[in-house]
Image: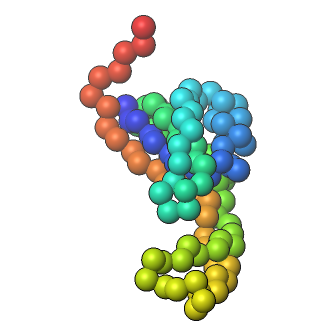
Amino acid sequence: MKLILAIVQDQDSGKLQTKLMKAKFRTTKLATTGGFLKAGNTTFIIGTEDEKVDDVLEIIKENCKAREQAISPVASLSVTVDTYVPYPVEVQVGGATVFILPVDHFYRF
C-alpha cells in the first residue's frame, strides 16, 4: 500500500478531485499555501494499493497543468525606492508535486 501526497494549484483542485472520485479513489483534501508565491494550493492525501499508483499519477498528470503567470517582484530592503522599478516577471506555476510513501499498516474504523 502507498500514501500519495499531491500538492496542486487551487485552479486544478476541483477538476482533479472530480476525476479521482470518478475513478473510485478516496481522497482527503487540505487547503495549503505555497512558500514561493504564497498562493493557495491544495494537498491531496490518497491511499491506494501499489498496483494502482500509476493510475493515480496518470489522473494527476492529465488534470494538473503548468502555466505561466506574471508576478511583481518584491523590493529588497537594500534597494532605495527611487531606483527600484518593479517589472512583472513571468514564472511557471501549476502542475503537481507528488510524494509517494510506503504504508506499513492501514486501518479504517
**Horizontal side of residue 103 vs 19, given as left or right:** left
In the displayed structure, 96 sits above or below 44; it is below
Identify which residue is drawn at 29% across, 23% down.
105
Q: Position of residue 23 (x, y in %)?
A: 65, 33
Identify which residue is drawn at 49% across, 85% down.
79
The mark total stands at 0
**Horizontal side of residue 45 vs 20, given as left or right:** left
**Horizontal side of residue 41 vs 36, given as left or right:** right
Q: Position of residue 78 (x, y in %)?
A: 43, 83
Identify which residue is drawn at 66% across, 30% down.
21
In the displayed structure, 24 sits above or below 38; it is above
Q: Nearer the viewer, residue 107 or 49?
A: 107
Quick check: can you spot residue 108? yes
Q: Nearer the viewer, residue 92 or 109?
A: 92
Quick check: can you spot residue 58? no
In the displayed structure, 32 sits above or below 105; it is below
